[in-house]
Image: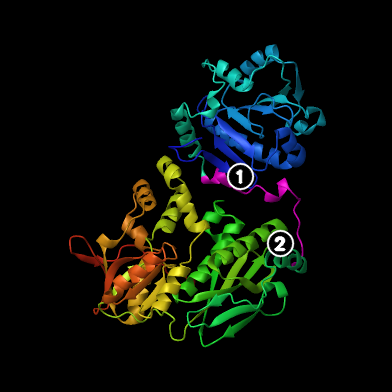
Amino acid sequence: MYEGFPPSRLVLETEDFVLLADMSPLVVGHLLLLPKRHYLSFSEVVAAHRAAVEHLVSRVLGLYRATFGEPLILEHGSTEFEDGNGCITHAHWHLLPVDGAKVDEFMVAETAGHVSLSGIADLADERWSGAYYLRGYGDDYRLYFPGESNKRQYLRSVAGRVLSMEDPEWDYAVVVRKEALRETMGKTSRWTVAQRLLLNHLEKATMSVPNVFSDEPTRLDRVISTLFANQSSAVPSARHADGTTVAVVAGADSQDDCAVLAVRGDQDLVIGSDYVRGPKFRLYEYGLLTEFDLGYYLVAANVSDVAAMGATPIGVVSVVRYPAEMDDVKFEEVMTGIRQACADFGAPNIGGDIGGAERLILSATAFGTCMPGRALMRGGARPGDLVCLTAPTGTAGAATEYFRSGRTVEAIENDHRDELLRSWTRPQARVREGVFLGRSGFVTSCQDTSDGLKATLECIARSSGVGVVVDEAAIVVPEAVTAVCRALSKEPLAVIMGDSVDFELVFTIPPERAAELAADFETAGLSFGVIGRITEEPCAVMRLRSGERVDIPGAAWRHATTA
């Protein structure tokens, strides 16, 4: 098993394929291309999905040539009864910067014959249903047929001989030549965002079905009804401590004009609505977010507002307007992202609107309920209150800075890339924390950080007619933020306090209740930190470690306007 640095061997990924660095590379640039679904050989893959394979390979080879030179493609093609001497009976191609002509010299002499192919499509021929060796180099693809004397891992040993290496027949199963692996990951990490975009925008439908463009009633019937089936029920979807409940009587599955919620008992209804940018997300334009991610983000942004009110989410209605070029697969992906986020946050998508538009438009409204008078407002903070934060901010802002820069930094790619992307692909609405705060009865104000930490602090202070002092020493700087700021010569505090969309909760409490709330949070597996204090003087400042007070660093988010 592979462990250690770099922590991941993943180079590129599409809906149906992954490109990995070999964990025991024969040479720098040794990569493995394999399908996510199980096939015994690429002959089977091409037979089922020729267009997808040709489209993918043309782009992978273009990236490869620009980085490592002309790739040699090798495969031990296997069947259920003949493993092709490859040991692993799952389709995979080896890509190595090795001279294919020199490999041929050995294979012509040592195998039981060969045939030339006109291209990848010829792999689908039923004649190659048995075990084979594939050798591709430039535009020349050949199939060799195993002889009785060919040993296990034959192609690996041939490539090793061309490279003047000691026979590497068995070392594929252990981690060796790790420096070559690290150098491979370092060089592939330098592939630009634009190049990654070519792969991420592969048509996801090409591995299964052709593009389908259904009309609105058909999408409603085939997609919405399927994804959101069996919502309507008399079983409560939300229940408060005093016994009040809410149940979805008619949800999206009923396909009526409106959803119906059965509200039992005295409770306050909380409603929030938010539009998100759809395809105008910068990271989506870079190919780093999928349609699924956009749907997920839409729900998270709306449910976060409900959480900031201390309410329990009870439902979401969504508006998904799509352009004519969005096929059924991509539409379903948006809706699947919405459904997944709704499931994660306990707020069913109970209805909304779908239909055509000039581009993808995403908007939603989230509903929640709380016990009477317990909704958390922005305007209740009092002098002396502690200012608290559910978790450190800045990761989403650092992600935007890093990916927008167009740079690839090996340490960030290896150690922080996934964390940075998750801040946008799987943002977390702090629902459980919000419910705890709302039920406590002593939280004086609350707001989420969707406009950034600085903007949130200033808004609470302004709404409450008070001031706020943030302690620099109390601000936690995530490692990913530190790494990005170091690489891009950015000030960490400016990124943390600026317009980083992290969906954390800022709230204020009387100091004498802090220990009680901390104990309740810990019991529930939650946490928060104290980052400052509310003051009488109406200003928002940061107290440095030196004791000096300065303006809070960073640029607060402001929605742009045009003349």
Identify the residue shown where x is 38% and y is 61%: 393
The secondary structure type at the circle numbered 1 is: helix
| Front of the two marks 1 and 2 | 1
Measure the C-alpha gap from mark 1 to mark 2.
Answer: 23 Å
Q: Residue 444 placed where, x, y %?
A: 35, 79
Tell me residue 262's x, y (percent).
Answer: 62, 83
Amino acid bearing label 2:
Ala
- Residue 295 highlighted magenta (yes or no): no
Q: Which residue is mark 1?
A: 199
Q: Is residue 447 above or below residue 325?
A: below
- The residue lying toward the viewer, choosing from 477 and 156, is 156
- What span is in magenta? 193-216
Q: Residues within 10 Å of mark 2 (few under 14, many from 20)?
A: some
The quadrant holding residue 62 is: top right
Q: Amino acid at mark 1?
A: Leu
Query: Residue 203 colored magenta?
Result: yes
**What residue is shown at x 70% (from left), y 42% (from top)?**
52
Residue named by callout 2: 324
Q: Are marks 1 and 2 in contact (CB under 8 Å)?
A: no
On screen, residue 148 above or below 453: above
Q: Residue furthest right?
A: 126
Which sits in the foreground, 262 or 182? Answer: 262
Q: Colour scheme in the image? A: rainbow
Say what secondary structure mark 2 lies in. loop
Frontmost residue, 145 versus 442: 442
**Can residue 470 be seen from the camera position used here?**
yes
**Which of the labelled discs sits on residue 181, or is there none?**
none
Whether residue 50 sits left or right of residue 237 in the image: it is right
State the residue in front, 199 or 236: 236
Image mark count: 2
Name which of mark 1 and mark 2 comes first in the sequence: 1
Question: Going by the picture, which residue comes out furthest to the top?
Answer: 109
